[in-house]
Amino acid sequence: MNSEAGIKHLLAALKGARQSPVPFWYMRQAGRYLPEYRKLRAEAGDFLDLCYSPDLAIEVSLQPLRRYAMDGVILFSDILVVPHALGMGLRYIEGEGPQLDALDRRDVLPRYRREAFLAHLSPVFETLKGITAEAPAGATVIGFAGAPWTVATYMIEGGSSRDFAKCKSWAFQDPENFQLLIDLLIDSTSDYLSAQIDAGAEVVQIFDSWAAALPEMALQRWSLAPILAIAKRIGRKHPGVPVIAFPRGAGVSYKLYAEEPDISAVSLDSTVPLSWAAEHLQPQAVVQGNLDPQLLVCGGAPMLEEAERILAALSGGPLVFNLGHGIVPQTPPEHVAALSEFIRGWRA
Ligand code: CP3
């Protein structure tokens, strides 16, 4: 962990200053690949109970930092607490992922009641306060939420989906009605992230994990525009707090996110070509990424050679080293240690 001249290393990079060594953290850095997570998770029983128990969620958030001293500590929670706090039934079934009581386009949308919504999420804010108090001094506290499009896919499909058929037919056939759902998610997610910042988050990341499902015009309307609306509200209320957008799989459309002044950084999935990112994205935004999580499962020379390639290609501008998607449960913890040592020791 590094914090020169008082400003945290990761925060400085996200505000646009090139840092050496390159700051790093990993998406899903807390989770099932860590034995100490599995132990706490078994004690908590249910995944949602873990998310809503500040003492346990603080501990789980800090676990990976004790091993690897990343430059960032991300809140331990899930993107689906937002629909849950809006009143939707939510369960996590072992081995099957999340299940929600699916929303139909003929249903009346839940009316947004800000007080009740934020009250439901108060354990998350308590968790952030605890993380802020207990994290190592140089670690930047990262809050997050799902982007409206990705959260809407879970609300409409009732869980994970391969083709997003229900969600797309709603959006394509009845866009004015679908906009009402997206607007509800813009309002609630903006309030949620703003409250996370009040509770100690120093940066926020917006996960649009399923952006790649959308064709060009739909991507602009349902992924880019809602993320931008949220980023603008955060920018007005909390000037200077960096917003990271992660439109996973957006391809050349990454440029549209990077060129928006309210979006400070873009998190690159593993398919984004490095030289293209250096030329077209980095002049306009900080870039974060993008090691393939399967290389972290693999470890050894293939992992380190790719990490070297990423650092060499992108360290000429502001860069945060990360993965192209979250750490998977099969990852050997010692590979994460080896990668972290490599990043820490690397110089341009
Ligand atoms: O990065 C971190 O360490 C913070 C924690 C975090 C979780 N989920 C914990 C979690 C974050 C940032 C998320 C985001 C999230 N959740 C996304 C966006 C990022 C992405 O991966 O694309 C999405 C799409 C979800 C929805 C979700 N939550 C799914 C599909 C699943 C089941 C799949 C799985 O890995 O089991 C979850 C559950 C979940 N969220 C777990 C964790 C650690 C596993 C729960 C367990 O312990 O059983």
Image (cartoon, rainbow, N blue to C red):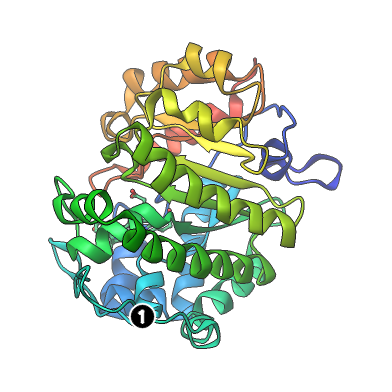
In which quadrant will I find the N terminus? Answer: top right
User: For this rendering, which residue is in front, 129 or 65?
Assistant: 129
Which residue shows up at 61% across the image and 30% down it?
A: 259
Q: Position of residue 234 (x, y in %)?
A: 66, 58
* Picture layout, residue 318 above or below residue 142: above
- The residue lying at 39 percent from left, 51 percent from top is 28
Above or below for 74 versus 131: above
- The 10 Å Cα crowd at callout 1, few under 14, some 14 to 19, many 20 or more, is few
Coordinates of residue 152 in the picture (x, y in percent): 32, 60
x%, y% of residue 320?
A: 58, 34
What is the quadrant of the C terminus in the image? Answer: top right
Q: Is residue 82 above or below residue 285?
A: below
**Pick the front one: 335 or 192:** 192
Secondary element at tag 1: loop
Q: Nearer the viewer, residue 109 or 67?
A: 109
Residue with the most extreme right position: 5
Say whether mark 1 is within 8 Å of ligand 1.
Answer: no
* Quarter location, residue 23: top right
Residue at x 47% of width, y 54% of height: 64
- Does the image show residue 340? yes
Measured from the top left, where is residue 267 in percent x and y?
49, 37
Q: Mark 1 highlights which residue?
A: 110
On screen, residue 244 above or below 233: above
Residue 43 sits in quarter: bottom left
Amino acid on which disc 1 is placed: Pro
Say whether residue 78 is visible.
no
In the image: residue 305, left or right of residue 45: right
**Ligand 1, what quadrant?**
bottom left
